[in-house]
Image: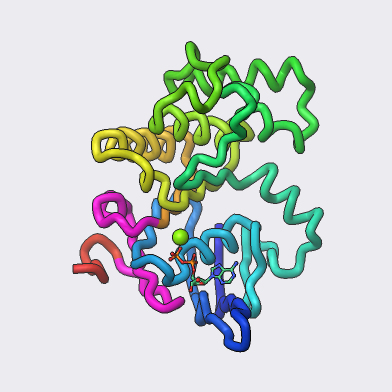
Amino acid sequence: MYQLTGVTRDYQKGRHTVHALDGVDLVIEDGDWLAIQGPTGHGKSTLLQILGALDRPTSGTVLFDGQDLTRLRESQLTQVRATSIGFIFQSFNLIPTLSAQENVETALVPLRVASAERQERALRALTDLGLGDRARHLPSELSGGQQQRVAIARALVKQPTVLLADEPTGNLDEGTRDEIMTLLEQLWDQLRLTLVIVSHDSIVAGRAQRTGLMENGRLTIGTRSTHPIS
Ligand SMILES: Nc1ncnc2c1ncn2[C@@H]1O[C@H](COP(=O)(O)OP(=O)(O)O)[C@@H](O)[C@H]1O
Ligand SMILES: [Mg+2]
């Protein structure tokens, strides 16, 4: 699915350079459930943005299903994102003036799905996540856990192969965190997704098949039995 080799990402901050990613090598197989843990400011979001074709590395290669994302034009990256990659965020990133259903529909607009089919698929995606009766609500009329479910529906309505999540439970209480993690694991299993979650929360990371530790822009991959985090 993914093969990253020697990936770096530098940011210019005034006169000095921040090495947000400092030579990341990573293979992610189809159907993997990988958690990347690590303290704030160590490059986790930067790595996820690159996996999500939202950003480009400064150097290195990023193979996604055999094609090098670093060589694609912007329009081609947009196409990869629209068809293959679902993304969810800590702060949900819903559009506040749109209903839950309209938020989910936005994922189908770049795919040129006709309006009636968009509405139908969005409603079905919400219903599958237990939110059929909330479709007309605005985000402000929903709890945090419900807003994250809407965001998950928006990420999955296009039937992507990969789901990327950046601190998906960071704004939720513990009970809701566990509920959302259970939901993500069920979806990973049912839909045969490749799931990558970055989180500073060891409870979240502890549930993954494989874990990695990001420190100072460098990634160490372990497994459950040889966990890099004690
Ligand atoms: N757009 C940006 N411009 C400048 N520096 C950035 C930008 N994004 C991230 N950084 C820097 O890169 C480093 C890694 O950030 P980030 O990937 O967001 O870490 P994490 O997600 O682990 O908290 C930090 O030092 C951060 O300040
Ligand atoms: Mg981050």
Tally the numbered discs: 0
Above/below status of 125 relative to 151: above
From which residue to which does the magenta span run? Answer: 199-222
Above/below status of 102 relative to 229: above
User: To which quarter of the image does residue 225 belong?
Assistant: bottom left
Left or right: residue 145 compared with residue 67: left
Above/below status of 227 relative to 133: below
Q: How is the image coloured?
A: rainbow
Quadrant of the snapshot with the C terminus: bottom left
Above/below status of 150 relative to 201: above
Q: Residue at x 34, y 67 (%)?
A: 39
Q: Residue at x 42, y 27 (%)?
A: 146
Q: Residue at x 38, y 43 (%)?
A: 171
- Residue 180: where, in percent of width, then height? 35, 36
Q: Residue furthest bottom?
A: 15
Q: Residue furthest left?
A: 230
- Residue 118: where, in percent of width, then height? 70, 22
- Residue 195: where, in percent of width, then height? 45, 49
Q: Residue furthest top?
A: 133
Left or right: residue 41 compared with residue 58: left
Q: Residue furthest front?
A: 14
Nearer to me, 37 or 211? 37
Nearer to me, 77 or 46? 46
Residue 184 in the magenta stretch? The answer is no
Quadrant of the snapshot with the N terminus: bottom right
Residue 221 in the magenta stretch? The answer is yes
Left or right: residue 19 compared with residue 41: right
Q: Residue at x 59, y 63 (%)?
A: 50
- Residue 175: where, in percent of width, then height? 24, 34
